[in-house]
Image: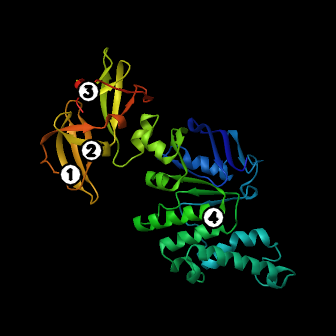
Amino acid sequence: MAGISIEGVRRRFGTVTALDGVSLQVAAGEFVALVGPSGCGKTTLMRIVAGIEGADAGRIVINGRDVTRLRAAERNVAMVFQSYALYPHLTARQNIAVPLAMRRLSTAQRLPLLGGIWPGAAEVRRGIAADVTKAAEALGLGALLDRRPGQLSGGQRQRVALARTIVRSPAAFLMDEPLSNLDAALRVQTRREIVDIHRQSGAATLYVTHDQAEALTMADRVAVMQAGRILQLGTPEDIYANPVDLRVATFIGSPRINTLPAEAGADGLVRVGGLPIGLRAQPGALTFAVRPEDCRLAETGIPMETAGAEFLGESLLLHGLHAPTNSPVILRLAPEAPRPRPGTPVHIGFDPARALLFDAAGQRIARVAAMAEKALV
């Protein structure tokens, strides 16, 4: 298939399993983000796809060609690193031109003095210059091409690194946390530019990040990784609203999803701190989860003692503690909502249709609405 196919990739470092049989398909023109905490294996997987590192088992196929045993230079992929990796003695123009010069010019044509007069060199260099200018203008670098990296800001250096990547028209883009060194404003601007570049190229893009906001806003699909495995793969909307694993639910979302110990009794009613919450499930120990924006202050419901509030402009975060289980709780309310003093007892209501239940192993289970008169939501 066109795109990237990762099939059963395994990698161990001594006794540590970095990747445990990872499989993933990225179609041509698709943007897939790998997201997860540090040490989950996402960068190791990226390096294996790029050919920088080998796998103990499994196969990598790019645009229908098995590249598992090919060197990085033979895979026709372009990689953007966390560090800019620019040559400090070369101008932005020369940095962008490096991959084209290595591919299009012979060894003799690349010689500093004689290369320029070697047969055919002038025509090739004109083609390289045109491609460099096109890539630079796409990223707003036209006026900066004759500056060296030391004369550029961090955001400008990152754009030069991106231009050097796209100028090759590779079969696939691999990006390893390329925005982590930028400030917040530049990250928002540059991630939009990366998505635009991806769409224009039509190539498969695999993007590694620990920042869930980048994953959710940029990707067509998101793969959430932990402990060397992909826990869930889906659209950003599905990953957020329908996590199949408690680890996915708690990693994705800011503020973090509220989780409270719960139990379904023999009657099937789910109780938190001994109080029924309007849901039914199979008897057993559970974790009840609900996102802050799906909570509200109510006359009756789950009891909480307030601990403080944060005004964010577009919303108000009300922090508190569910005393029976000693669990922190956050509500995202309208900015004009009342702010109870710290220590004030209140009650939490929630939308049962948006609540989630997980079993003792952390796997998502079905829940059914209970009778209204038995619900305290």
Gap in Å between the C-alphas at discs 4 and 1? 44 Å
Element under disc 2: strand
Q: Are marks 2 and 4 in contact (CB under 8 Å)?
A: no
Colour pattern of the rendering: rainbow
User: Going from the N terminus, do you reach mark 2 or mark 4 first?
Assistant: 4
Q: Can the viewer see residue 229 in this picture? A: yes
| Up/down of 199 relative to 275, above or below | below
| Up/down of 139 relative to 342, above or below | below
Element under disc 4: helix
Gap in Å between the C-alphas at discs 1 and 3? 31 Å
Mark 1: amino acid: Ala
Question: Which residue in the structure is indicated by mark 4?
Answer: 200
Q: Residue furthest right?
A: 119
Gap in Å between the C-alphas at discs 4 and 3? 52 Å
Question: Which residue in the structure is indicated by mark 3?
Answer: 372
Asked where in the image residue 100 lies, by quadrant, the reply is: bottom right
Q: Position of residue 87 (x, y in %)?
A: 61, 73
Question: Which residue in the structure is indicated by mark 2?
Answer: 330
Mark 4: amino acid: Gln
Q: Indicate which label's residue lies in the foreground, 2 or 4.
A: 4
Q: Position of residue 103 (x, y in %)?
A: 77, 68
Gap in Å between the C-alphas at discs 2 and 3? 25 Å
User: Going from the N terminus, do you reach mark 4 or mark 3 first?
Assistant: 4
Mark 2: amino acid: Ile
Question: Which residue in the structure is indicated by mark 1?
Answer: 309
Q: Indicate which label's residue lies in the foreground, 2 or 3.
A: 3
User: Going from the N terminus, do you reach mark 2 or mark 1 first?
Assistant: 1
